[in-house]
Image (cartoon, rainbow, N blue to C red):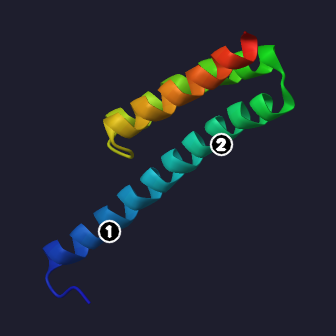
Amino acid sequence: MANTSSAKKATRKIARRAAVNKTRRSRVRTYVRKVEEALAAGDKTAAEAAFQAAQPELMRAASKGVIHKNTASRKVSRLAQRVKTLTA
């Protein structure tokens, strides 16, 4: 257990930040899942719309440090590729 007041404050800050990050990560997963479901259903318009919503959410998470920038770029790239093959 933290003894000093600064350590106690640091613990509170970490807990707050972890909660925010957890929310952001969950939000990203939800958007990505919507794209995956649209792809699985073979719905072209829904997949494109879901991808357009998911892309900024992934990049926002990367800019906030929730996920790595390269991870976000990789996920966007792979989803875009799958949406593109569905439309072809």
Measured as percent of width and height from the top left, residue 13 is found at 30, 62
Q: In the rendered image, which residue does mark 1 sit on?
A: 12
Asked whether the viewer can see residue 53, the reply is no
> Which residue is at the front of the view, 74 or 11?
74
Tell which circle, 1 or 2, labels the residue nearer the N-terminal end.
1
- Residue 39 horizontal side relative to residue 41, left or right: left
Measured as percent of width and height from the top left, residue 2 is found at 22, 85
Asked whether the viewer can see residue 81, the reply is yes
Residue type at mark 1 is: Arg
> Which residue is at the front of the view, 30 or 80?
80
Distance of mark 1 from mark 2, alpha carbons? 27 Å
The quarter of the rendered structure image containing the C terminus is top right
Measured as percent of width and height from the top left, residue 53 is found at 61, 23
Residue at (41% x, 29% y) in the render: 73
Q: Secondary structure at mark 1?
A: helix
Q: In the rendered image, which residue does mark 2 sit on?
A: 30
Vertical order, 58 against 12 (above or below): above
- Residue 59 horizontal side relative to residue 45, left or right: left
Quarter of the rendering containing residue 39: top right
Residue at (73% x, 22% y) in the render: 47
**Among all residues in the image, which is located at the extreme top?**
88
Q: Residues within 10 Å of mark 2 (few under 14, many from 20)?
A: few
